[in-house]
Amino acid sequence: MENKHPKYAKLIEYIRNGQVQQEHYGIIIRMNKQGIINKIGEDGGYKFYHRSCMKPLQISPIIDLGIDKKYNLTLEEIAVCSASHTGELIHQEKILSVLKKLGFCEKDLLCHEETPLSENEKIRLIKENIKPSKLHNNCSGKHSAMLAICRELNFNTSNYKDLSNPLSDFIINKVCELCEVKREQIIISKDGCGLPVIATPLFNLGLGFLNLFLNKKYEKIKLAFLNYPYLIGGKGRLDSEIISESKNLIAKVGAAGLCVIVNTEKEEAIVVKIADANMEARAHSVINSLSQAGWISEGNLNNLKQIYSAEIKSQDCEVLGRINPCFDLSKSLK
């Protein structure tokens, strides 16, 4: 089946003294389980890789298989298994805790040693002359969960990230189930950390999140996100900051300009994809989407805008321009 190219819409523009200096295009979908409520741009059924947005879907078998109960995993440990974390000490501690409960250690992780995303942790490593470890890898929590699933199903743990390992088919089939898409309709590749990743239309990615976070069976994953947002990402990470500024929003970012937000009260999702993967444009697109959908209070919105300022400033802190949204997600709401 042909994977037609999407028709992106302009979402964000940078303006200095009335002149547009920078533009970012993408797609935004607001949806529920019944269908699309509103959208900006047209994906035309194009299949996008889920990247790290797939993590909470990938770790759902720890609930299906009763691993959470068998090993007494805490909400904090479930959170870090879903994380694209910054590699701070708190993240490392929780991952080590998960591994210890499962009878594994750091060397069993097949993710690579990676420089942490956290600037403070980078500085600490330099000061103390410490090399980055596998625990610093932003996918190490997910890899811990994969070890747990392999152990429970008697799959080989020494090559768990290989497509030949039965874990691959097991996880892919589970994600397809949540996303309500047939196996033959997806595209399979590998993510940066070496584990399989699938591509589906954005609507199916949103369905996966709604089917996970609105299902009482997966209440622990939902509560892990809502109660421990810092473990999902870290300081300044868009998903962590959004969850922290709300009582009912769950967010997860993914590479290549992706972010999915679930409103657990309205039982809706917003899926954002930035064509050029610019992270600043993604943040402003997501924050403006939440504002236009009425999903966040003015006070919480202002707190997010303090972190992700729309003002373009000089090094002297002089305001030179603004970062403006070019879309209206509220126009054709049902």
Image: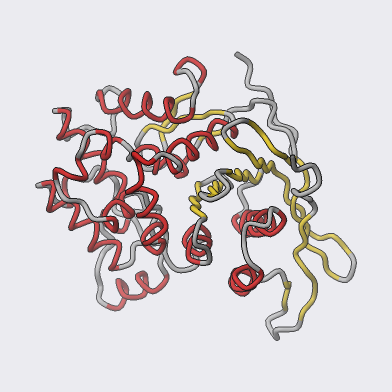
Query: In the image, is 114 to the left or to the right of 94?
Result: right
Q: Give the residue drawn at x 31%, y 75%.
A: 124
- Toward which corner of the image does residue 61 lie, by quadrant? top left
Task: Name the spot of residue 216 as percent of width and height, x first.
Answer: 37, 41
Residue 288: x %, y % from top left: 69, 58
* Residue displayed at 20% across by 38% down: 66
Give the farthest residue toward the bottom: 316
Indicate left or right for 272 with 141 as reference.
right
Q: In the rendered view, tell whether residue 246 sits above or below residue 161.
A: below
Tell me residue 88's x, y (percent).
33, 67
Q: Determine whether, in the image, residue 238 is placed left or right of residue 44.
A: left
**For the view shown, which residue lies furthest in the right direction?**
18
Foreground pick, 139 / 154: 154
- In front of the other: 42 or 30: 30
Identify the image's colour scheme: rainbow, by chain, secondary structure or one colour: secondary structure
Residue drawn at (28%, 68%), measured in percent from left and top?
89
Q: Give the percent coordinates (x, y) of residue 188.
A: 45, 25
- Quadrant of residue 214 within the rendered picture: top left
